Image (spheres, rainbow, N blue to C red):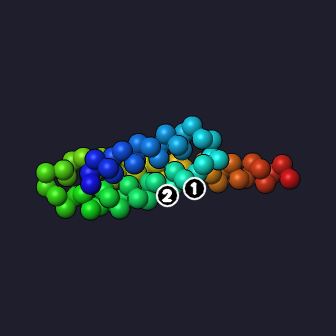
């Protein structure tokens, strides 16, 4: 579960950075799944470090995706 959390966290960060806020919801959903898997993975003492890294990456990805999505929506709203 820790490895899956780390992979999903990295994917959400990449989506947040390179989509420009357009796919922010997709990145946010992936990050939420990564957060859940990271929390479940921390229960296993063997993969606690990887799960913690996945949890941190997923939280950063969630914040990044939502922040850029809101900024993109605000820019579009300002043009109308």
Quadrant of the image for the N terminus?
A: bottom left
Question: Are dots 1 and 2 in contact, CB under 8 Å?
Answer: yes
Vertical comparison of 28 with 20: above or below:
below
Q: Find residue 19 and report its image quarter.
A: top right
x and y, in percent, of residue 67 in the image:
58, 51
Residue in the picture at 22% in, 58% down: 42
User: Can you identify the residue that label 1 sits on?
Assistant: 25
Residue 21 in view of the camera: yes
Residue in the picture at 28% in, 47% down: 3
x and y, in percent, of residue 28 in the image:
51, 55
x and y, in percent, of residue 78 in the image:
81, 51
Element at label 1:
helix
Residue in the picture at 43% in, 59% down: 32
Q: Label 1, label 2: how many angstroms apart (C-alpha)?
A: 6 Å
User: Can you identify the residue that label 2 sits on?
Assistant: 29
Dot 2, how many residues are within 10 Å of its Cα: few (below 14), some (14-19), or many (20+)?
Answer: some
């Amino acid at each position: 579960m820790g490895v899956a959390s780390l992979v999903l966290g990295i994917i959400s960060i990449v989506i947040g950075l390179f989509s420009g806020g357009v796919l922010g919801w997709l990145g946010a959903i992936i990050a939420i799944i990564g957060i859940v898997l990271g929390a479940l993975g921390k229960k296993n003492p063997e993969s606690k470090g990887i799960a913690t890294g996945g949890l941190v990456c997923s939280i950063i990805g969630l914040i990044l995706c939502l922040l850029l999505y809101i900024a993109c929506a605000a820019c579009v709203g300002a043009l109308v």
